[in-house]
Amino acid sequence: MPGTDIGIDLGTSNTLIYLAGKGIMLNEPSVVAVYKTNGEVIAVGQEAYRMIGRTPDNMEVLRPVSNGVISNFYHTQHMMKEYIHRVSKNMFLNPRVVLCVPGEITEVERRAAVDTLHQAGARRICLLDETVAAAMGAGLDVLAPGGCGVIDIGGGTADLAVLSLGDVASSRSCKNAGRAMDEAIINMVRTRHELWIGEQTAEAAKKAIGCARPPQTELEFTVRGRDVRTGLPAARRITSTEMCEALMPTVRRIGETLTMLLEDTSPELLSGLQENGMVLTGGGALLDGMDEVLSAYARLKVRRAEHPMECVALGAGTALRFLNETGTEGRGYVNPLMEA
Protein backbone atom coordinates (compact mmCIF):
# COMPACT_ATOMS: atom_id res chain seq x y z
CA MET A 1 0.00 0.00 0.00
CA PRO A 2 1.45 3.39 -0.91
CA GLY A 3 2.44 5.57 2.00
CA THR A 4 1.52 9.12 2.88
CA ASP A 5 4.15 11.84 2.61
CA ILE A 6 4.76 13.72 5.85
CA GLY A 7 7.14 16.42 6.99
CA ILE A 8 8.42 16.35 10.58
CA ASP A 9 9.87 19.06 12.78
CA LEU A 10 11.32 16.94 15.60
CA GLY A 11 12.17 19.65 18.11
CA THR A 12 13.55 19.64 21.62
CA SER A 13 10.33 21.16 22.97
CA ASN A 14 7.66 20.24 20.42
CA THR A 15 7.12 17.89 17.49
CA LEU A 16 5.08 19.11 14.52
CA ILE A 17 3.94 16.90 11.64
CA TYR A 18 2.81 18.18 8.25
CA LEU A 19 0.61 15.86 6.19
CA ALA A 20 0.82 16.33 2.43
CA GLY A 21 -2.29 18.00 1.09
CA LYS A 22 -3.68 18.81 4.54
CA GLY A 23 -1.15 20.94 6.40
CA ILE A 24 0.06 20.69 10.00
CA MET A 25 -1.92 17.89 11.63
CA LEU A 26 -0.01 17.45 14.90
CA ASN A 27 1.73 19.76 17.37
CA GLU A 28 2.67 17.95 20.60
CA PRO A 29 5.39 18.31 23.26
CA SER A 30 8.44 16.12 22.66
CA VAL A 31 8.14 14.34 26.00
CA VAL A 32 7.40 10.81 27.20
CA ALA A 33 6.41 9.51 30.63
CA VAL A 34 7.98 6.18 31.60
CA TYR A 35 8.34 3.73 34.47
CA LYS A 36 11.81 4.03 36.03
CA THR A 37 12.16 0.29 36.59
CA ASN A 38 11.85 -0.95 33.01
CA GLY A 39 11.55 2.17 30.84
CA GLU A 40 8.05 1.24 29.70
CA VAL A 41 6.29 4.22 28.11
CA ILE A 42 3.13 5.34 29.92
CA ALA A 43 2.21 8.45 27.93
CA VAL A 44 3.56 10.73 25.22
CA GLY A 45 2.99 14.31 24.15
CA GLN A 46 0.57 16.59 25.95
CA GLU A 47 -0.54 13.86 28.32
CA ALA A 48 3.06 13.29 29.41
CA TYR A 49 3.78 17.03 29.56
CA ARG A 50 1.00 17.49 32.13
CA MET A 51 2.80 14.96 34.34
CA ILE A 52 6.01 17.03 34.63
CA GLY A 53 6.71 17.62 38.32
CA ARG A 54 3.70 15.51 39.30
CA THR A 55 4.90 11.92 38.89
CA PRO A 56 5.23 9.40 41.76
CA ASP A 57 8.64 7.95 42.64
CA ASN A 58 8.34 5.03 40.21
CA MET A 59 7.73 7.26 37.15
CA GLU A 60 9.57 10.05 35.35
CA VAL A 61 9.02 12.35 32.40
CA LEU A 62 11.82 12.43 29.82
CA ARG A 63 12.73 14.56 26.82
CA PRO A 64 14.17 12.07 24.29
CA VAL A 65 15.33 14.89 22.00
CA SER A 66 18.10 17.15 23.29
CA ASN A 67 19.53 20.18 21.47
CA GLY A 68 17.61 19.19 18.35
CA VAL A 69 19.04 15.66 18.11
CA ILE A 70 17.88 12.28 19.40
CA SER A 71 19.37 11.46 22.79
CA ASN A 72 17.21 8.41 23.56
CA PHE A 73 16.63 6.10 20.60
CA TYR A 74 14.01 3.81 22.16
CA HIS A 75 11.74 6.51 23.58
CA THR A 76 11.98 8.70 20.48
CA GLN A 77 11.03 5.71 18.35
CA HIS A 78 8.01 5.02 20.56
CA MET A 79 6.97 8.68 20.47
CA MET A 80 7.31 8.97 16.69
CA LYS A 81 5.45 5.72 16.05
CA GLU A 82 2.55 7.08 18.12
CA TYR A 83 2.60 10.46 16.38
CA ILE A 84 2.80 8.99 12.87
CA HIS A 85 -0.10 6.68 13.69
CA ARG A 86 -2.19 9.62 14.93
CA VAL A 87 -1.59 11.49 11.70
CA SER A 88 -1.98 8.61 9.24
CA LYS A 89 -4.89 6.98 11.11
CA ASN A 90 -3.69 3.68 9.67
CA MET A 91 -0.96 1.45 11.13
CA PHE A 92 -0.37 -0.14 7.71
CA LEU A 93 0.68 3.05 5.98
CA ASN A 94 4.45 3.44 5.55
CA PRO A 95 5.02 7.12 4.80
CA ARG A 96 7.83 8.86 3.05
CA VAL A 97 9.25 11.41 5.49
CA VAL A 98 11.12 14.68 5.28
CA LEU A 99 12.75 15.14 8.69
CA CYS A 100 14.23 18.49 9.67
CA VAL A 101 17.54 18.33 11.55
CA PRO A 102 20.12 20.87 12.78
CA GLY A 103 22.80 21.59 10.21
CA GLU A 104 25.68 20.81 12.59
CA ILE A 105 24.65 17.29 13.66
CA THR A 106 27.16 14.47 13.29
CA GLU A 107 26.90 11.47 10.98
CA VAL A 108 26.12 9.27 14.00
CA GLU A 109 23.24 11.57 14.96
CA ARG A 110 21.99 11.56 11.36
CA ARG A 111 22.04 7.78 11.32
CA ALA A 112 20.18 7.64 14.64
CA ALA A 113 17.46 9.89 13.20
CA VAL A 114 17.11 7.73 10.08
CA ASP A 115 17.05 4.46 12.04
CA THR A 116 14.51 5.83 14.51
CA LEU A 117 12.03 6.75 11.78
CA HIS A 118 12.57 3.47 9.94
CA GLN A 119 11.70 1.61 13.13
CA ALA A 120 8.68 3.92 13.56
CA GLY A 121 7.34 2.80 10.18
CA ALA A 122 8.71 5.21 7.55
CA ARG A 123 9.74 3.59 4.26
CA ARG A 124 11.97 6.44 3.08
CA ILE A 125 13.57 9.23 5.08
CA CYS A 126 15.05 12.43 3.70
CA LEU A 127 16.89 14.86 5.97
CA LEU A 128 16.48 18.60 5.52
CA ASP A 129 18.49 21.32 7.24
CA GLU A 130 16.23 23.11 9.75
CA THR A 131 17.35 26.55 8.64
CA VAL A 132 16.46 25.78 5.02
CA ALA A 133 13.07 24.47 6.15
CA ALA A 134 12.47 27.53 8.34
CA ALA A 135 13.28 29.87 5.47
CA MET A 136 10.97 28.00 3.11
CA GLY A 137 8.19 27.97 5.70
CA ALA A 138 8.61 31.73 6.17
CA GLY A 139 8.10 32.25 2.45
CA LEU A 140 11.70 33.13 1.52
CA ASP A 141 13.05 32.32 -1.93
CA VAL A 142 15.90 30.04 -0.91
CA LEU A 143 16.84 29.45 -4.57
CA ALA A 144 17.69 33.10 -5.11
CA PRO A 145 21.41 33.85 -5.67
CA GLY A 146 21.21 37.11 -3.72
CA GLY A 147 21.10 35.38 -0.35
CA CYS A 148 18.56 35.24 2.46
CA GLY A 149 19.08 34.88 6.18
CA VAL A 150 17.20 32.97 8.86
CA ILE A 151 17.46 32.88 12.67
CA ASP A 152 15.59 29.88 14.08
CA ILE A 153 15.39 29.94 17.89
CA GLY A 154 14.04 26.63 19.12
CA GLY A 155 13.91 24.93 22.48
CA GLY A 156 17.39 23.40 22.46
CA THR A 157 19.39 25.45 19.98
CA ALA A 158 19.33 28.66 18.00
CA ASP A 159 20.35 27.88 14.42
CA LEU A 160 21.37 30.74 12.17
CA ALA A 161 22.20 30.57 8.47
CA VAL A 162 22.67 32.52 5.28
CA LEU A 163 21.20 30.66 2.32
CA SER A 164 21.91 31.00 -1.39
CA LEU A 165 20.95 28.94 -4.44
CA GLY A 166 18.99 26.46 -2.34
CA ASP A 167 21.75 25.57 0.12
CA VAL A 168 23.51 26.85 3.23
CA ALA A 169 26.29 29.31 2.44
CA SER A 170 27.28 29.93 6.07
CA SER A 171 25.83 28.86 9.40
CA ARG A 172 26.27 29.03 13.15
CA SER A 173 24.54 27.29 16.06
CA CYS A 174 24.06 28.44 19.64
CA LYS A 175 23.24 25.96 22.42
CA ASN A 176 21.46 28.67 24.42
CA ALA A 177 17.83 28.94 23.37
CA GLY A 178 14.32 28.42 24.76
CA ARG A 179 15.19 25.86 27.42
CA ALA A 180 18.12 27.98 28.62
CA MET A 181 15.71 30.87 29.02
CA ASP A 182 13.40 28.76 31.17
CA GLU A 183 16.31 27.70 33.38
CA ALA A 184 17.40 31.32 33.74
CA ILE A 185 13.91 32.26 34.94
CA ILE A 186 13.89 29.39 37.45
CA ASN A 187 17.27 30.50 38.81
CA MET A 188 16.22 34.15 39.00
CA VAL A 189 13.03 33.38 40.95
CA ARG A 190 14.95 31.12 43.34
CA THR A 191 17.72 33.63 44.09
CA ARG A 192 15.67 36.84 44.13
CA HIS A 193 12.38 35.62 45.54
CA GLU A 194 13.48 32.48 47.40
CA LEU A 195 10.92 30.38 45.56
CA TRP A 196 11.32 27.09 43.73
CA ILE A 197 9.24 26.92 40.55
CA GLY A 198 8.92 24.27 37.83
CA GLU A 199 9.65 24.51 34.13
CA GLN A 200 5.97 24.82 33.21
CA THR A 201 5.63 27.87 35.47
CA ALA A 202 8.83 29.36 34.04
CA GLU A 203 7.59 28.86 30.50
CA ALA A 204 4.23 30.45 31.36
CA ALA A 205 5.99 33.47 32.83
CA LYS A 206 8.22 33.77 29.75
CA LYS A 207 5.20 33.77 27.45
CA ALA A 208 3.31 36.25 29.59
CA ILE A 209 5.91 38.94 30.39
CA GLY A 210 9.23 37.75 28.91
CA CYS A 211 11.16 40.37 26.93
CA ALA A 212 14.51 40.65 25.19
CA ARG A 213 14.96 44.37 25.93
CA PRO A 214 13.90 46.69 28.78
CA PRO A 215 10.10 46.80 28.75
CA GLN A 216 8.30 49.95 27.65
CA THR A 217 5.50 49.14 30.10
CA GLU A 218 6.17 47.31 33.37
CA LEU A 219 4.15 44.12 33.66
CA GLU A 220 3.76 41.65 36.52
CA PHE A 221 3.09 37.93 36.72
CA THR A 222 2.33 35.69 39.70
CA VAL A 223 4.40 32.53 40.01
CA ARG A 224 3.58 29.76 42.45
CA GLY A 225 5.93 27.19 43.89
CA ARG A 226 7.71 26.13 47.08
CA ASP A 227 9.25 28.58 49.50
CA VAL A 228 13.00 27.91 49.74
CA ARG A 229 13.14 28.58 53.50
CA THR A 230 9.94 26.94 54.77
CA GLY A 231 9.30 24.32 52.10
CA LEU A 232 5.65 25.38 52.03
CA PRO A 233 3.54 26.53 49.07
CA ALA A 234 3.97 30.20 48.26
CA ALA A 235 3.42 32.77 45.51
CA ARG A 236 5.48 35.75 44.34
CA ARG A 237 4.97 38.60 41.90
CA ILE A 238 7.74 39.02 39.34
CA THR A 239 8.17 41.90 36.91
CA SER A 240 9.03 42.15 33.24
CA THR A 241 12.18 44.08 34.17
CA GLU A 242 13.37 41.12 36.25
CA MET A 243 12.54 38.82 33.35
CA CYS A 244 14.56 40.96 30.97
CA GLU A 245 17.57 40.85 33.28
CA ALA A 246 17.28 37.07 33.63
CA LEU A 247 16.97 36.47 29.89
CA MET A 248 19.62 38.98 28.80
CA PRO A 249 22.63 36.58 28.93
CA THR A 250 20.87 34.09 26.63
CA VAL A 251 19.73 36.84 24.26
CA ARG A 252 23.27 38.24 24.22
CA ARG A 253 24.75 34.86 23.25
CA ILE A 254 22.32 34.55 20.35
CA GLY A 255 23.20 38.09 19.24
CA GLU A 256 26.92 37.35 19.42
CA THR A 257 26.37 34.17 17.39
CA LEU A 258 24.57 36.26 14.77
CA THR A 259 27.53 38.63 14.63
CA MET A 260 29.91 35.72 14.06
CA LEU A 261 27.66 34.35 11.31
CA LEU A 262 27.77 37.66 9.44
CA GLU A 263 31.56 37.79 9.83
CA ASP A 264 31.69 34.40 8.07
CA THR A 265 29.46 35.55 5.20
CA SER A 266 30.83 36.78 1.87
CA PRO A 267 30.48 40.49 1.01
CA GLU A 268 28.24 39.64 -1.95
CA LEU A 269 25.75 37.80 0.25
CA LEU A 270 25.94 40.51 2.91
CA SER A 271 24.84 42.98 0.28
CA GLY A 272 21.74 40.87 -0.34
CA LEU A 273 21.02 40.65 3.38
CA GLN A 274 21.27 44.42 3.75
CA GLU A 275 18.64 44.75 1.06
CA ASN A 276 16.34 41.88 2.13
CA GLY A 277 17.03 41.56 5.86
CA MET A 278 16.72 38.33 7.84
CA VAL A 279 13.72 36.39 9.11
CA LEU A 280 13.25 35.27 12.73
CA THR A 281 11.51 31.93 13.36
CA GLY A 282 10.98 29.42 16.17
CA GLY A 283 9.40 29.83 19.59
CA GLY A 284 12.10 32.30 20.64
CA ALA A 285 10.86 34.69 17.96
CA LEU A 286 7.80 35.33 20.13
CA LEU A 287 9.87 36.90 22.92
CA ASP A 288 8.96 40.57 23.01
CA GLY A 289 11.62 42.74 21.37
CA MET A 290 13.78 39.86 20.13
CA ASP A 291 13.61 41.07 16.51
CA GLU A 292 14.67 44.60 17.56
CA VAL A 293 17.61 43.37 19.63
CA LEU A 294 18.91 41.11 16.86
CA SER A 295 18.47 43.92 14.33
CA ALA A 296 20.80 46.02 16.49
CA TYR A 297 23.40 43.24 16.63
CA ALA A 298 23.25 42.61 12.88
CA ARG A 299 22.83 46.26 11.84
CA LEU A 300 20.24 45.15 9.34
CA LYS A 301 16.50 44.45 9.36
CA VAL A 302 15.36 41.34 11.25
CA ARG A 303 11.65 40.61 10.95
CA ARG A 304 9.57 38.00 12.75
CA ALA A 305 7.86 35.42 10.54
CA GLU A 306 4.07 35.42 10.44
CA HIS A 307 3.83 31.96 12.07
CA PRO A 308 7.28 31.53 13.62
CA MET A 309 6.64 28.29 15.54
CA GLU A 310 5.29 26.52 12.45
CA CYS A 311 7.90 27.62 9.88
CA VAL A 312 10.10 24.52 10.05
CA ALA A 313 7.15 22.15 9.70
CA LEU A 314 5.69 24.25 6.87
CA GLY A 315 9.06 24.18 5.13
CA ALA A 316 9.23 20.40 5.47
CA GLY A 317 5.78 20.24 3.91
CA THR A 318 6.92 22.43 1.02
CA ALA A 319 9.92 20.17 0.47
CA LEU A 320 7.71 17.09 0.12
CA ARG A 321 6.98 17.87 -3.52
CA PHE A 322 10.67 17.53 -4.38
CA LEU A 323 10.67 13.88 -3.33
CA ASN A 324 9.25 12.96 -6.73
CA GLU A 325 11.91 14.79 -8.71
CA THR A 326 14.64 12.85 -10.45
CA GLY A 327 18.06 12.80 -8.83
CA THR A 328 18.95 12.50 -5.17
CA GLU A 329 19.49 16.13 -4.27
CA GLY A 330 16.01 17.49 -4.92
CA ARG A 331 17.37 20.81 -6.31
CA GLY A 332 19.30 21.38 -3.13
CA TYR A 333 16.35 20.96 -0.79
CA VAL A 334 16.26 17.31 0.25
CA ASN A 335 19.09 14.84 0.73
CA PRO A 336 17.86 11.23 0.89
CA LEU A 337 20.29 9.32 3.08
CA MET A 338 18.64 5.94 3.04
CA GLU A 339 15.86 4.06 1.28
CA ALA A 340 13.79 1.47 3.13
Image: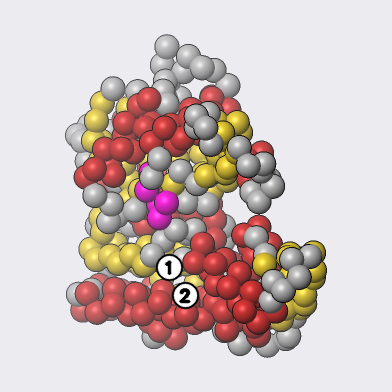
Q: Which mark is residue 111?
A: none
Which x, y percent locates residue 296? 44, 86
- The Cα–Cα distance between marks 2 and 1, rounded to whole angstroms, is 6 Å
Q: Is residue 83 visible?
A: no
Q: Are marks 2 and 1 in contact (CB under 8 Å)?
A: yes
Q: How many marks?
A: 2
Disc 2: which residue: 250
Answer with left or right where residue 243 lies relative to residue 121: right
Answer with left or right where residue 200 lies relative to residue 170: right
Circle 2 SS class = helix
- Which residue is farthest front? 230
Disc 1: which residue: 176
Span highlighted in magenta in the image: 66-70
Identity, as a three-letter code, of the amino acid under mark 2? Thr
Q: Quadrant of residue 85?
A: top right
Predominant secondary structure, magenta span:
strand
Q: Quadrant of the N terminus?
A: top left
Question: Was residue 97 drawn as part of the magenta stretch in this picture?
Answer: no
Q: Quadrant of the C terminus?
A: top left
135 w.r.t. 259: above or below = above
For marks 2 and 1 on the same chain, the one whose residue lies earlier in the sequence: 1
Q: Quadrant of residue 118?
A: top left
